Amino acid sequence: MCELKACDFVECIDNKPAGRKRRTMPELGRFYTIESVRPVADGYSVRLNELAPDCRRGGTCTCGKCGWDSSRFRKIYRPSPEKIAALTALLDAPDWVDVPEAESIERDAWVMRPPLRRGAPRV
């Protein structure tokens, strides 16, 4: 079973031609959108929206039966819109919180724990 399906975002993780030489290959590390996935022999063939493969008949594919092996791609998981909204809400929050007693706590801690000096005995 192939985990990829149409409209998934994928990253190319293998761009080396296998078998016959191909002129058109996906770029390593680039992101693509899947147009379709179909079973082929003991694997799956993937067609991309952004790139047309070479046809087995020659030239750029127009038959719709050409593509790349699905193992060449890694699915990019995208969070749901609700999760994205929650994360952007965090970005809109203020960077600091006004707590007046925080300064006195830091000052008291400094008075209670002076910095250690080399050779000074620990108390």
Image: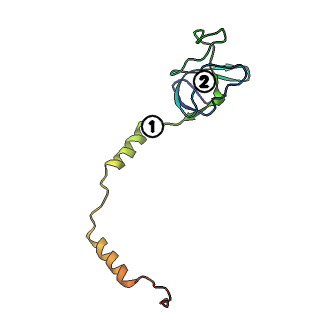
**SS of the residue at dot 2?**
loop
- Label 2 and label 1: CA atoms lie apart by 31 Å
When asked about the image quadrant of residue 98, the answer is bottom left
Residue 75 image position (x, y, % from top left): 57, 33
Q: Residue at x 60, y 10 (%)?
A: 59
Q: Is residue 97 left or right of residue 13?
A: left
Q: Is residue 13 above or below residue 117?
A: above
Callout 2: 10 Å neighbours few (<14), some, many (20+)? some
Image quadrant where one finds the N terminus: top right
Question: What residue sits 53% from the left and 32% below the top?
Answer: 30
Secondary structure under the numbered disc 1 in the rendered image: loop
Q: Which mark is residue 105?
A: none
Circle on res. 25: 2
Determine whether, in the image, residue 114 is placed left or right of residue 102: right
Which numbered disc flags the more N-terminal residue, 2 or 1? 2
Q: Amino acid at mark 1?
A: Ser
* Residue 122 percent coordinates (x, y): 49, 89
Query: Looking at this view, is 23 or 31 the one in front?
Result: 23
